[in-house]
Image (cartoon, rainbow, N blue to C red):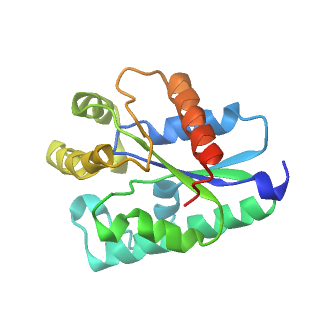
């Protein structure tokens, strides 16, 4: 793949949407070199002093999130410059300025990128969350708030929204690929 063909794919959705699993599957299924960067993994590189968002969104949580987003964007831009397409999974909220798409657009700059939202029904999110552990397991109340804050993705037309409720991970990866092909054909990058 030529560097000019590489791009960044941002995958968003609530906790339990299948972002990380789908991102890994999509990256693994590609014929060209593709990397996967989970923002949560980069955030959790902070060991001492980690600001856990489950304990509330504070100025320190925001600072650590912003740093992780900038680090992920820098890695992705370096990858794309070297011809490596990169998928980043993150909870990108449509109407919460602290974690919105505008922040990613600014961080990625001129690097070609596309955004796809995974949005299963809330019951599926609850079921999937119950299988999580550690920092990834969210309280039902927080999960509901996050889900409600992601719902507005359904009301816009620019970002493809994939209902992953009844899809297996390989099916989600295929749906992501179709969405990416449509976005790339339209020339609508970032």
133 left or right, relative to 108: left
Q: Can you see residue 83?
A: no
The residue nearer to you, when weighing 118 against 153, is: 153
117 left or right, relative to 139: right
**Quadrant of the rendering where the C terminus is positioned:** bottom right
Picture coordinates of residue 121, whole percent (x, y): 27, 31
Residue at 43% across, 69% down:
102
**Outermost residue toward the left?**
141
Residue at 26% across, 50% down:
152
Residue at 20% across, 46% down:
139
Q: Which quadrant of the structure image shows residue 25?
A: top right
Up/down of 77 relative to 117, above or below: below
Up/down of 56 relative to 58, above or below: above
Q: Which quadrant of the structure image shows residue 140?
A: top left
Picture coordinates of residue 88, whole percent (x, y): 55, 53
Q: Can you see residue 88?
A: yes
């Amino acid at each position: 793949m030529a560097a000019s063909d590489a791009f960044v794919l941002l995958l968003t959705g609530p906790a339990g949407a299948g972002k990380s699993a789908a991102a890994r599957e999509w990256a693994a299924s590609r014929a060209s070199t593709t990397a996967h960067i989970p923002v949560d993994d980069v955030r959790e590189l902070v060991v001492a002093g980690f600001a856990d968002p489950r304990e509330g969104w504070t100025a320190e949580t925001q600072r650590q999130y912003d740093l992780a987003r900038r680090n992920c964007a820098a890695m992705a831009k370096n990858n794309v410059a070297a011809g490596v397409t990169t998928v980043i999974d993150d909870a990108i909220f449509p109407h919460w300025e602290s974690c919105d798409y505008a922040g990613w657009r600014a961080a990625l700059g001129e690097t070609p990128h596309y955004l796809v939202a995974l949005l299963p029904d809330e019951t599926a999110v609850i079921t999937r969350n119950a299988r999580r552990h550690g920092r990834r397991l969210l309280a039902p109340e927080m999960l509901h708030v996050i889900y409600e804050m992601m719902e507005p993705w359904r009301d816009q037309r620019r970002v493809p929204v994939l209902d992953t409720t009844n899809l297996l991970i390989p099916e989600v990866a295929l749906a992501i690929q179709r969405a990416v092909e449509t976005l790339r054909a339209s020339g609508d990058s970032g």
